[in-house]
Image (cartoon, rainbow, N blue to C red):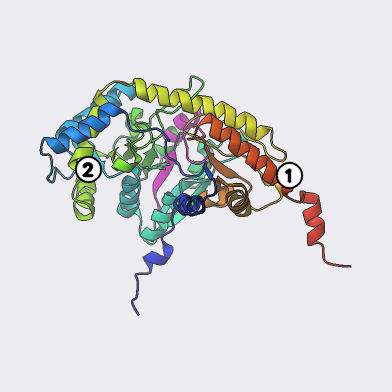
Amino acid sequence: MVTMAAGMSRLGTESAFQVLARAKAIEATGRSVINLGIGQPDFSTPPHIVEAGGKALRDGHHGYTAANGIPALREAVAADLHRRHGVEVDPAQVVVVPGGKVTMFFACLMFGEPGAEILYPDPGFPIYGSAIDFSGAKGVPIPLREKDGFAFQAEEVLSRITPRTRLIIINSPANPTGGVSTKAEIDKLVAGLEAHPNVAVMSDEIYSEMLYDGREHVSLLKYESLRNRLILLDGFSKTYAMTGWRLGYAVWPKDLAEPATRLAINDHSCVNAASQWAGIAALTGPRDEVNRMVAAFDQRRRVVVDELNALPGVRCVEPGGAFYAFPNVSALGIPAKRIETGLLEDAGVATIAGTSFGAQGEGFIRISYANSVENIREAMKRIRGWLDAQPKAAERSQLKQPAQ
Ligand SMILES: Cc1ncc(COP(=O)(O)O)c(C=O)c1O
């Protein structure tokens, strides 16, 4: 009998991958499943990026690269951040990694240990909590509320800081809610953090190019007072539809770029060279495909929100970014996990229970609208059919009454 380290029992998961596997298994039996579960663009990577990856292989880029990423890519990242946020970034502080997830794991390993506390959004991307727990640190949830459009309230974040707090994780635009933090709250948070100079911040800005209705992204990179303790997480999976290429990056504080690179050397040596060359093409090439994808997500967002709000017992605030809607289904009186299972098994629609993103997610489900308008409309029809077949909440509570 083998004995795993205790940390393994604390390591969580991202249930979107389990739902995806189950959806594929159902499809393999010949039944149709519409996938509104997994968070990945349904578009192909733009052709000029694919071509650059192929060319890199044909040109002989087959070996290890620098552990922190090839210099031309780190320079392209710095130039792109300057274009988007108007900030100066030293390419030496950029560490290229196989996906944004790696940055969050590294940050939690770097700061987390028994006795330490790390603040993270709830509902939030499930790997934050998982990586924090694995590190041995105590995860302290920052509740995000529907009434605030799922944006954090600076005072609530600041009030949770203790002498044990090492790291605060924030994410805007957010998974799973599509919530976008306002500049006013970010300003307040940064001002409040001046009283806590030893607390690091990891800002997950992987959806920063997916904003709607004229919203502008406020990067934490813009705040000079944070630059010596800010980890800026970004990547290529979402903006460039490159989830399978495994390419992301972070800007680390000057002193932390070396330890982050050491983690990379221990973990994966470097990102595969072809993906890195493709990444250069993504950052330096034409942007019309990116704009086209964002416009398509925006159109779907409107459809999904209208359709969800027309369903009985469902209400949905308008998401400001990313490609997720997070409808409130609490009026149905059915636990979120049961809704997820019922929709998948009975109605052929993959969604994710809000509870997969934290305790605050009960009463919600996540809908990824990275699917065609036609499929979204068909999915909503199926969901309506499933809801109509459920006993009403009042009937259910009667069913639960003990017999007289
Ligand atoms: C909020 C957030 N951050 C980071 C990631 C990581 O993406 P990747 O590892 O593909 O770059 C995801 C992916 O779903 C995400 O939703």
Looking at the rendering, the quadrant in which ligand 1 lies is top left
**What segment carries the magenta color?**
161-190
Q: SS of the residue at dot 1?
A: helix
Please, what is the three-letter code of the amino acid marked with disc 1?
A: Asp
Which residue in the structure is indicated by mark 2?
Answer: 257
Q: Please name whichever residue, 289 or 136, is drawn nearer the observer in this view of the structure.
A: 289
Q: Residue at x 16, y 31 (%)?
A: 72
Q: Residue 162: horizontal and vertical position, in percent?
A: 45, 51
Please, what is the three-letter code of the amino acid marked with disc 2?
A: Ala
Residue 323 visible (yes or no): yes
Q: Residue 209: horizontal and vertical position, in percent?
A: 40, 28
Q: Is residue 398 above or below residue 368?
A: below
Q: Residue at x 24, y 44 (%)?
A: 256
Which residue in the structure is indicated by mark 1?
Answer: 388
Q: Is residue 161 above or below residue 94?
A: below
Whether residue 91 appears in magenta in the rendering, the answer is no
Q: Is residue 176 above or below residue 282?
A: below
| Residue mark closest to the camera, 1 vs 2 | 1
Q: Are marks 1 and 2 in contact (CB under 8 Å)?
A: no
